[in-house]
Amino acid sequence: MTYRNRELANLVVVGILTALGFASVYIARQDIVSTASLSYAGFFFALYLAAHLVARLTVPYADPYLLPMAALLTAIGLTEIYRLNPTDAFRQGLWIVVALCAFALTLFLLKHDYRRLESYKYLFGLSAIALLVLPALPVLGTSVNGARLWVHVGSLQFQPGELAKVFLIVFLAGYLREKREVLAQGRLKDFGPLLLIWGGAMLVLIETNDLGSALLYFGIFLAMLYVATGRFLYVGLGVGLFLAGAFAVYHYVEHVRERITIWLHPWTDHAVYCAINGKLLPRQDCASYQLVKSLYSVSHGSWFGTGLGKGTFRTTGGGELIPYLNTDFIYSALAQELGLVGVAALLLVYMLFVSRGFKIAMLADDGFSKLLAIGLTFAFALQTFIIVGGILRLIPLTGITLPFISYGGSSVVANFVLLAGLLLVSNRANAERE
Amino acid sequence: MNRQIARLGLVGVALVAALIVATTYWQTWASAGLADRQDNEIQRVAQFSIKRGLIRASDGTILASNRIKKVGGQKLYLRRYPQGGLFSHVVGYSTQSRSRAGLESSMNDYLTGANRNLDTVLKTTLDRIRGATITGNDLWLTMRPGPQRLAMRELAGKCGSVVALDPRTGKVLVMASRPTYDPNLVEKDFNRINNIRATCRPAAPLLNRATDGLYTPGSTFKVVTASAALDSGRFTPQSRFFDPGYCIEYGKQVRNAGNPEAPETFGSVDLITGLEHSINSVFCNIGKAIGAGKILGYAKRYGFYEDPPLETPANERSPSGLYKNGELFRPSDPRTQVDPGRLAFGQERMLATPLQMAMVAAGVGNKGVVMEPFVVDRITNPNGGVVTRTKPRKLRRAVSRQTAQELTQMMEGAVQSGTGTAAQIPGVPVAGKTGTAETGIPGRYTSWFISFAPANAPRVAVAVVLQDQTGFGGQVAAPIAKDVMQAILAGKANP
């Protein structure tokens, strides 16, 4: 079977799963959703067939598992968003269309040779910073939950940081490919532009209070630097710098200090000062409210979960039990409804996606392709870890999106561009071996 | 570069693997602990997505059912109590804001299908995997709605309690407590429950007076003292006493209670007359003769000093016994720490629950054997199959068969020609004992009556207590006991 036929077969399986997922939500909640909900599954399948055809035309030799896995993840996300709020699901559906357009555009533009991107690396680096600065601008930017991440154009909301991530990876791949030998020797002046771009990004992030992304970018930077130079010393230095920076930030930034306290002691037996309303309350009723409620949701899922559409997210009066369920906390909604069996399978899909990505990097035969593939893949893995690990109290909680699943247009678009990048690298490597 | 990529790949995979491990921790290991936390609203709300089992009286009357409420497209099963305040102290309530009480709390596992019986575990696991609504098991109580309704009606406007047991099995037939509350209001309008008016203070409408109300037993406790006197062989029903109208203890006179139906001074009497007419001096002398330790020992054989065994939550039941500063008092040396004379007629610091005094009456009636009271007759699964059925269990033998017989005769005498004549039922021999305990306020009594019938082969044993009465037990409590016994005896022998 050819690569693309295998991909088609996988997509058919995903299509069936999607139909089942929507059907089960529909059956569990038939009183408020119409039968039209099943057309979501049909629409969804048609959309991915189109994406598949684009892949046939542009990247015939690319890895046949990545697109079906991305389809599966977006389908799970869309189903859960639909279950939580049908209006949001409609918008998310539109965003998936936009994302697939971006996906097709990327493939068509770069199908001959994506490696020419390398020559525009500084442009990518600067655009990344420009994108990151956008929300901090007075007219365009908006602040959500104390973090300035959003850009408003008319009624359209966009989080440019998500795309900046991909751009930054392109820049790093190009720069590190060019300078890897000298960098490995440790010539200080070659680190200049690298540190400049990276430092700029970090500054902007701290300024906009987006700590999750700062952690993500830092991780990507270290990972790519390690792969390019092969020197553990840099990783050690980087981690050391990070810890020192974290320590300083902990002492000087109230917002960060609170995050750490919440992480270490989400529950208190006694009342503590609550900054939100100025009262004395146990911490679980105040600062760590979100984390604790989300953990209750996860643990309520137990082995098999409550079943799609049957989870408890509202009080008997109809109020919300868990905040930001659609976006930051979608994993805790899924964990409750799918149970350990379901979300472990979901995480295995993420794991498979990551291992396919690394395999692509191994097979690629030039430095730029390798670095680009590991950058994109590791970004995907680390982003998943930061948000889910935050929800599960492995690390302090920071609000970033779960790739392909969370509600949010920019995130979906960026992740499909990321997917297109991986397919391009994979296509080239496989084509040469054929 | 491939070596570095392989290493980094391991890191990437390990990151996701760590998420699987952490999820497993929260969803299995930590799950039970989080579910028990007070602030876990999900857990409380989620309970309502379970179709809770029904609670029914012995004849099938529904005491607790469900009403469906849609919240965000999800079906929630909220509780409804069709009988209002009639059974509320036993049944309790299950709400979101105030959690649970009564059988709704203690039998929650059965009602939500979380019990560990194999049949239920299989069914709920299948339901969970299928995504079907989990349905709990139904409770069938031993309580009889007719007599219960009657008892509640007779208690109306008063503070008090009626408990009726089947002495042969320990089945709770009636468990009434006033003032009561409507469990349907707990969620909606708790203030209306809290601000209830009553003749007693505190009104405490949520208190199950039958199992958690502690009252001075007064002369009803003489049955326990007489048990000790006869069973130990120190006295016989024919033992003679001289009653000067008082008994001398620690050099002071302890006077008989002023009983308008009987003379203050009886002169030379036997024990039978002593119990029939509830003569304090007779029992005071018995107490001095056999000692407080012996009396307390017999009280324990009837169930004093232990939580009365019943399926309701442990914090809604209190042990009977001596109390000191609000705590159960276990004297290490009863001879010096307890006044035996006053203990013998149920004063001192003795406090008893109506359930406990019903157990005393039932034990005497059941030839000296006290049965463990129970209120849940059987539990059935949604298809009607029996999950468990309560088998009557012996608590212990309190007194010998002969002592029980002698006590029965003496208690029959009290109803035929003594203080308890108001409890007579035409054609049915009734054995009973009155009690009129001092409350510390002159002219205010805690009025009691305990009894069983038919005296020769009892099918019902009753304890009635009324707080803050001006009338004696024989006047105010005995008629209620009579009506309840009559209602139970008139019903089917064993529904």
Image (tube, coloured by chain):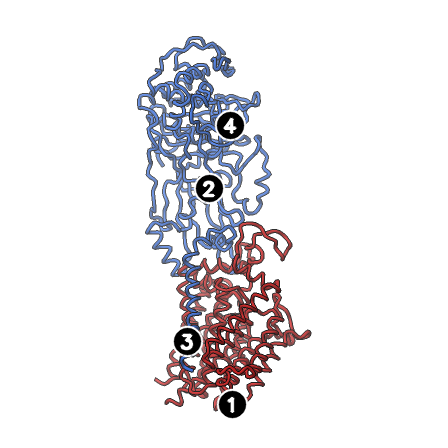
**Chain A appears in which tint?**
red
Say what amino acid the circle numbered 4 marks: Leu
B180 displayed left or right of B357: right
Tag 1, which chain? A
Say what amino acid the circle numbered 2 marks: Gly
Q: Nearer the viewer, residue A351 or B211?
A: A351
Tag 2, which chain? B
Name the image quarter holding residue B404. Answer: top left
Whole-number angstrom distance, CA of label 1 to CA of label 3: 28 Å
Q: Where is mark 1, residue-wise?
A: A116
The C terminus of chain A lies in quadrant? bottom left
Q: Is residue B482 above or below residue B57?
A: above
Local crowd size for mark 4, using a 10 Å CA cut-off: few (<14), some (14–19), many (≥20): many
Tag 3, which chain? B
Most distant residue in the right direction: A139
Q: Decide: marks 4, 3 in contact (CB < 8 A)? A: no
The spot of residue B363 in percent (x, y) is 36, 27
Numbered disc 3: secondary structure: helix
Tell me the tag on residue B449.
none
Whole-number angstrom distance, CA of label 4 to CA of label 3: 81 Å
Q: Nearer the viewer, mark 4 or mark 1?
A: 1
Q: Are marks 3 and 2 on the same chain?
A: yes
Q: Where is mark 3, residue-wise?
A: B7
Tell me which numbered mark, 4 or 2, is placed earlier along the sequence: 2
Q: Nearer the viewer, residue B288 or A120?
A: A120
Say what amino acid the circle numbered 1 marks: Arg
Tag 4, which chain? B
Tell me which numbered mark, 3 or 2, is placed earlier along the sequence: 3
Q: Where is mark 2, residue-wise?
A: B102
